[in-house]
Image (cartoon, rainbow, N blue to C red):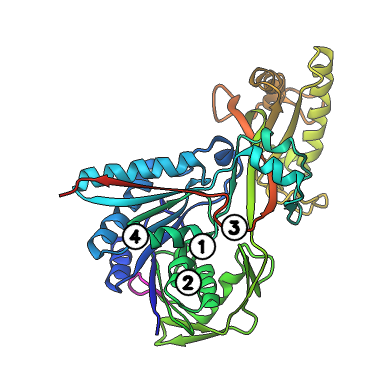
Amino acid sequence: MNVCKVFVPFGAMGTGISKDAFDGGIQLGPDIIACDAGSTDSGPYYLGTGLGKYARESVKEDLRMMVLAGHRLGVPVAVGSCGTCGSNIGVDDIAAMCAEICEEEGISLRVAKIYSEQNPEVLREKFNKGKITPLQAAPEITAKTFDECSHIVALAGAEPFIRALEEKADVILCGRATDTAIIAAMPILRGCDEAAAWHGAKIAECGALCCVDPMGGVFLTFDEEGVTVEATAPGNRCTAYSTSAHMLYENSDPFILTEPGVAVAVEHARYTEIEGTKVRITGASIEKKPYTMKLEGASPSGYQTVSLVGIADRRIMSDPWRWINSMKDHVQKRLDRIGLSGGYSYAFKPYGFNAVTGEDLAPGSFVPKEIGLIFIVTADTQELATKVAKVFNPMLLHYPVNQDEQLPSFAFPFSPAEIERGLIYEFRLNHVVHLADPLELVTIEYTDIGKRG
């Protein structure tokens, strides 16, 4: 029977793992060490700039553990969505870290760099031919949108990883990729059940999040009938509940997993607990679909300045928005009088009241003890954003509940109160591009790094 063992040490390279949990995965004898290194969870800034989210030192520490273990075992290492957003910059940055590790450790490796950042001209041509279609809730776009984005990436499927494995790469560093493709590639190449390969990859995409304790690593053993999932941290375990629940994670349909070129149905999957610590999963089925790659793009959307003020006045707490709206109307009149009437927008976020949910609460239904009011100005220029924030400054600090009383003083935690955030970005694409060749929009480069001989 064809078998493939995959060790996923963390849900995102740079978030870390204990030595015991990592060693536990290595002792199980993986055929590949694979993990994701990116996400859109923290918003469009990282794709907009092409830069990474995690501290370089944290990423390099995790990469070193994987590279050294792979070298010692003689098995490949695969990383997807390098540099958080999967830009070409991200791939090159991780490749540079890999070269440093090889130099520091005195080892040599064959590295495959898979680039999935897109050329706007190519995408514009496909758009004009009707080859780019929107996903649910996608923004409206035109042919100009692709040029307006500072970076666009396409999420690679399993095929580029399979190609790099066939070319005997020791380390595979991919730009933006689906989280599951990184894990499913080698089991598919090894002839394991393809539906189980995708299903198991989905369950393990976030590392130990599919375990009872979401810290540590996860280990998968794929074969021609299914997959077995187990935790690698001492004392941790997987259950039918913890593994099946992960199909709900970032998935609009808990019974259907859609990946480039395939749809995996898990409605009839069976989750069987083994020895109280592992879960055996079988019963997924697969259907081939026209091949598509999801596109993500981000573009500049202005400059921001923010201010934060702490307020604990009990009268304001009884109805924060009444005070906020009164202050806003008062300051807006002043902005208009001094000629600052366009080129900006602003928003208030009363944390401790309804800043997270944005819900309209019935008066008196909830009275906070205090709020942290964040004031956000977005403008065409940084100078204008800060000007508007400075006009609001005295009222954020001293605006009274009633106009016939002495001015209060609230609390700015920082001086100056205006914090310039610089250029900000917004997502512009939530579309798929239709392809005949899975490798059409990716480029793979191979390089030998480190000391040989």
Q: CA distance from mark 3 to mark 4?
A: 22 Å
Mark yes or no: residue 9 visible: no
* Label 3 sits on residue: 437
Considering the image in quadrants, where does the N terminus appear? Answer: bottom left
Which mark lies nearer to you, 3 or 2? Answer: 3
Which mark lies nearer to you, 4 or 1? Answer: 4
Q: Residue at x 42, y 53 (%)?
A: 13
Q: CA distance from mark 3 to mark 1?
A: 13 Å
Sequence-wise, the earlier of marks 3 and 1 is 1
Residue 136 point in image, percent of width and height: 75, 56
Which of the two residues, 230 or 110, is positioned nearer the viewer here? 110
* Label 4 sits on residue: 168
Q: Residue at x 66, y 75 (%)?
A: 255
Q: Are marks 1 and 2 in contact (CB under 8 Å)?
A: yes
Q: Secondary structure at mark 4?
A: loop
* Quadrant in which residue 95 is drawn: top left
Range of magenta residues: 229-236
Q: CA distance from mark 4 to mark 1?
A: 16 Å
* Label 2 sits on residue: 188
* Label 1 sits on residue: 158
Q: Secondary structure at mark 2?
A: helix
Left or right side of 99 for 390: right
Q: Residue furthest top?
A: 338
Which of the two residues, 225 or 418, is positioned nearer the viewer here? 225
Sequence-wise, the earlier of marks 4 and 1 is 1
